[in-house]
Every structure is written in structure tokens, then in C-alpha cells.
Image: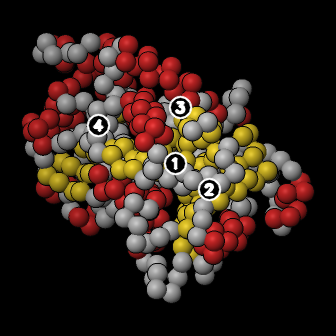
Amino acid sequence: MKEAKSIIEAYRKVNFSTQKAALATVMRVHGSSYRRPGARMLMTDDGRWTGAISGGCLEGDALRKARQAILSNRPSLVTYDTMDDNSATSLGVGLGCNGIIDVLIEPINELDVFNSIHLLEKFVERGELAVMATVFDSSLAENPYQGQRFLLNGLGEKYSTINNVNLETLIAADAQKAFVANRPAICQYTVDEAMVEVLVETLHPGIQLVIFGGGFDAAPVTSMAKNLGWAVTVTDDCIAHLGAKRFPDAENVTLCQRDHVSTDIVFKRFSAAILMSHNYKYDYAVLKELIKNPPAYLGIMGPKKRFDKMVDQLKEEGIYPGDTWAATVHSPIGLDLGAETPDEIALSVIAEIQAFFNNSKGGYLKHLDGPIHDRSAYDDRLLNNIYEQLNATGSKKGKA
């Protein structure tokens, strides 16, 4: 979400009366790469760019390719082989990713209401999970569909530039599967006896973080989350804790009575809540409300015995949801980083929330047996299997 917003902001500043622009998007990766499919970079013909498609090694050549795409007014698929030393020499840089990267570079027509940037705007405006499908390759010598897109958002709204009815129908079906499964895919279709390849990517709206408790140690958590592009709300039922100057990085600073949390705070699919007031009675009252209206992630600051006390109290009041629920609560909150200071603790908390939403254990990368990134994430057969399993269990994960 943060990169998408930056690209949109940069696009709005382009003076198309004197400048031209192009968008580079990573479509497919074989082997290792610093960025994964869906990484974007907006470029203008004066050599400026926003976003990134690599760790800095491909951007210069992508600018040159962008100028060619702008002159021809046609998209092109560029393949970078970072495993080939000769390719690295020709680019004038040292490439160490050991992967093959396909990048779609397309000129941007500012008058086209469905150009790729405008479709990104529709995703950002809604702030919900969306799926973007992009045609990037074909067995046809002249690929008439290259650069055409299909967007599906959480409200069921569809936007399409696909000019083949059969292809659009196939893409729409897989876009719905990707939305439900929350998994991207590279899909291959046979259209008019030609093979067409499409990147079906999930666009995440970013994490919504709600911090209950306006203490001094909530400020570094807010700042770190903001730097990641998360939407941060700080709330308390004590107005003295909610001075705007204390939380300049928060999107919202709001007064909410502890007994009204379940009705006044709205959680979405990618919502995280942190209880960190250091006031046991307040945290416990909020916890009871969150049982009624649970976020995807719930963390509680403090030692384990503090949460155990809350569990005992819930049992005494006859409102304990059960051990399965208790196991989902992150208390003590954070990854084990040996954190001591408020800033270090904030890093621990933010890292755990990031790991949670990325379905990662948060351990040392050197202990992984396989690659850093899940390369099966772009297997369309795996996507179909996940979709069928979710439907069989009656999953509602597609609901925002």
C-alpha cells in the first residue's frame, strides 16, 4: 500500500504537457530476486523514478527501456538474467540475485481513465483487499493483450481493459479465487489457440493498527507503524493521554470509552489491536469488548501472568471464550529480541505483527531450509487447490 500511494502521488505531480511517463512492474521471477512479482516503479522521461523493481541494480536499465516504450507507445516485456555474468557486464552493474526477472514496461496515457495508475488509485481509495490481473506474455508474435488489466475489489466492483470476452471470463474466475484464497498466481490460458500468461496479484490495503492506551511507549510503536505505511489509531478513555502532539504520526487519535469499544471501533480483515495502557482495569475492560468484536491480531503488553489473571477473571465471570481463543492472543506481545527500551520494544511488537500477517514465524533467515520467498505462491495449480479447500470448509476469508 505504501509503495502504491507513493507512485500515485508521484504520478499526480507529472506535468504531462512537457513530460512522459512509464510504469515498470515485475511480472515473473525464476530463482532469487530482491523484489517479487507486483513490485512497481513509475518513471518519467527526465530520468526520475518512484518505487523499485530491484535492490538498485535494474533501475538504470529500466529507465532506458522506459524511454523506448514511450517512443514506441507500446508495452514491452524485458527479461533480466541476474545469473548471467555477461548480462551483468552489459548493464554495467553487479547483479547477485541469481534469478531471472520478467518486467513489463508500459507507457502511461494520462487520458486513459483505466490506465494502470488509475486502477491503482481505485484500489487505494477503497482501502480494501483487491486483486489485479495483468496480461504480460503470449505465444503470439504480436501480443494484442499485453498490458491489459482486470481489477476486482472487496466490494465486488470490477474494472477491466481486457478486450477479449473469453479471456476476461477466465481471468475474472481466477481473480475471484485469488481473492478468496488471498494468494497470487501466474495463470496460463489458451485463447484463440494462443497461450496467454497473466499475473494475478493480491493487493493488500496495509495493516490497520489500533493502540489502546495513550502512554509514552505508544509513540514509538505509532512512528514505526507509520513508516511501514500502516493506518494507526491511538485511543484511550482518558482525554489527558490523547494530546495530538504526542502522536503526530497517528492517522486518528480518538477518545473511546472502554465499554463502547465493540461498537465504536471497526476492525477490518487486516486489523491488529494492542492493549498497552499499563492499567489492568482498562485493559481488561477493553479485552472483554474485543471478545465481542475480535481483530485479526490481538496483543497485550505485559508479563504472561498478567494475561493469566485476565483469563481467570473471564472464567469467574462466565465469559471465557475457551482455550482455543486464548491461544490466539499474543501475550506477552512481541518477538524475542531482547528488547529493553521503548524503541526496542516497539520494534519487537511491530516485527511480530508483520510476521503474523505474512504467516511467518519470525526466526533467523539462515535457519530456513529453502528459499526466503515462497516460490510456490505463483503456482496457479496451488491457487486452485487452496480455493477448493477454502470452499469445502465454508471459509469466509474473502469477506473484507
Q: Which mark is residue 303?
A: none
Please give the residue where the numbered disc 4 appears in the rendered image.
Answer: 400
Q: Which residue type carries mark 2? A: Leu
Marks 2 and 1: in contact by CB < 8 Å?
A: yes
Q: Which residue type carries mark 3? A: Ser
Q: Secondary structure at mark 2?
A: strand
Q: Nearer the viewer, mark 4 or mark 1?
A: 1
Marks 4 and 2: in contact by CB < 8 Å?
A: no
Instruction: State how far apart marks 1 and 3 are (Cα).
Output: 27 Å
Other residues around mark 4 within 10 Å, as few (<14) / some (14–19) / many (≥20): some
> Does residue 295 sit above or below 318 in this rendering?
below
Q: Which mark is residue 134?
A: 1
In screen coordinates, is 121 left or right of 156?
Answer: right
Instruction: State how far apart marks 4 and 3 are (Cα).
Output: 22 Å
Residue 351 can be seen, yes or no? no
Instruction: Name the residue at 24% across, 39% down.
Output: 267
Q: Earlier in the sequence, mark 2 or mark 3?
A: 2
Other residues around mark 3 within 10 Å, as few (<14) / some (14–19) / many (≥20): few
Q: Residue 364 placed where, x, y %?
A: 65, 34
Quadrant of the frame with the C terminus: top left
Q: Earlier in the sequence, mark 4 or mark 1?
A: 1
Q: Nearer the viewer, residue 226 or 382?
A: 382
